[in-house]
Amino acid sequence: MINYARQNQEDELASSPTADEHIAPAPRVSVQAFCETVETAAAVQAAGEDRRLAKAHLKIQMGGMAAAVEAYRTAPTPNVIVLETEGRGDILAGLDQLAGVCDAGTRVIVIGRINDVTLYRELVRRGVSDYVIAPVAPLDMVRSICGLFSVPEAKAVGRIIAIVGAKGGVGASTIAHNVAWAIARDLALDSVVADLDLAFGTAGLDYNQDPPQGIADAVFSPDRVDTAFVDRLLSKCTDHLSLLAAPATLDRVYDFGTEAFDSIFDTLRTTMPCIVLDVPHQWSGWTKRALVGADDILIVAAPDLANLRNTKNLYDMLKASRPNDRPPLYCLNQVGVPKRPEINVSEFAKAIESDPIVSIPFEPQIFGSAANNGQMIAEISANHRTAEMFLNIAQRLTGRAEAKKPRGSFLSPLLGKLRAK
């Protein structure tokens, strides 16, 4: 009999996925689907275009169970087989035939129209990995295929948050670093900042760190990248925040292929609950891949025409490329520069067809002091309105509504004054 790994709980038959559910990406596997209906074939095809199945090789054929049995009489089976079938008898009889031609280790997902616990138990007994009730949506297939490779007892896969500027100089890196600080300090979530601007990155300066190693050592040695190697490259900023710093030197040219950062991101996912990517303002294969592959995206823009155009382009492209994810978020920064004509927030929102999550005012004094001292805004003034905005962004990006701030006693204000003296 076929050796299948995953067995779902019976109550999953009635469950349905949500668009913002966190689903771990599938590894490099081969998936072959045998469909009965055009509608199911279209849903599977759409699932194959989802970012979480970007590494999987998907092939779709018509003919259902009978076509699968015939195909594997003379060909090896893939990692995953998706089978659509119509009736109870067809499913069980077909699976018995498939077992005779299937390779050990192949996993099977069955799409059927009978919602019956007895049938489900029989499918599990025969080694079926998952049973999905038709009609299926693309996200149903994404969830089912990716779920085959999730280990239940393992830690949750890290969530990647990508922050990018719509234009150079809008302060996207500053916001990325302060948001990561809020995630680590106020939400008590272990996080890492990956500075992807290898030539001109500022994360080391902003966190007052000068590590001897960083992300360049990993990207130029992809064969060495594993959990232990990446851990050695991390620089500790706080109890919950680490930094994967950029060298910020020009002694070499940083030209990368599309998949240059894949192994780094995959390794970070296994060890860190939250990964914040500081994505430089440039357009290349790897920057697009990093944005499309992230779980959540924040676009940082200033209130002028060029930023409006670029934000619109980025927003529309990312929304179209990620149909099963929530749309990107965006914020306005440097709002209210004296004597500078600006596009007001309502006009900006109307063009993007979405409201900014926050509008950060232009405050050169506090931002300049923080940058020159290697500090975060919350370190200079914990109660400043901008620090509250960064916390708001952190909550929206992580989906955590409540901040986990340390509890203090009624003597805390007095003790704080005494320490200051």
Image: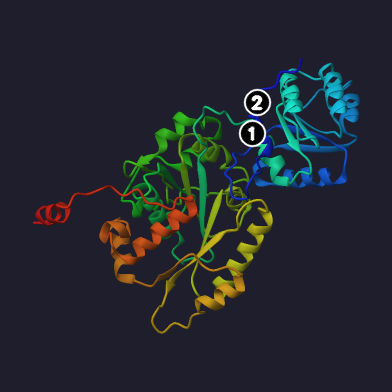
Residue 228 relative to residue 326: left or right: left
Q: CA distance from mark 2 to mark 1?
A: 15 Å
The picture quadrant where one finds residue 190 is top left
Q: Secondary structure at mark 1?
A: helix
Residue 203 relative to residue 357: left or right: left
Residue under label 1, please give it.
11
Crowding around mark 1 (Cα neighbors within 10 Å: few <14, some 14 to 19, many 20+) is few
Amino acid, disc 2: Arg
Residue 108 relative to residue 267: left or right: right
Q: Secondary structure at mark 2?
A: loop
Residue under label 2, please give it.
6
Residue at 16 percent of width and 56 percent of height? 413
- Counting residues from the start of the chain, the first of labels 2 and 1 encountered is 2
* 400 to 129, vertically: above or below: below
Disc marking residue 114: none
Q: Nearer the viewer, mark 2 or mark 1?
A: 1
| Quadrant (top left/top right/bottom left/bottom right) for the N terminus | top right
The picture quadrant where one finds residue 231 is top left
Crowding around mark 2 (Cα neighbors within 10 Å: few <14, some 14 to 19, many 20+) is some
* 117 to 396, vertically: above or below: above
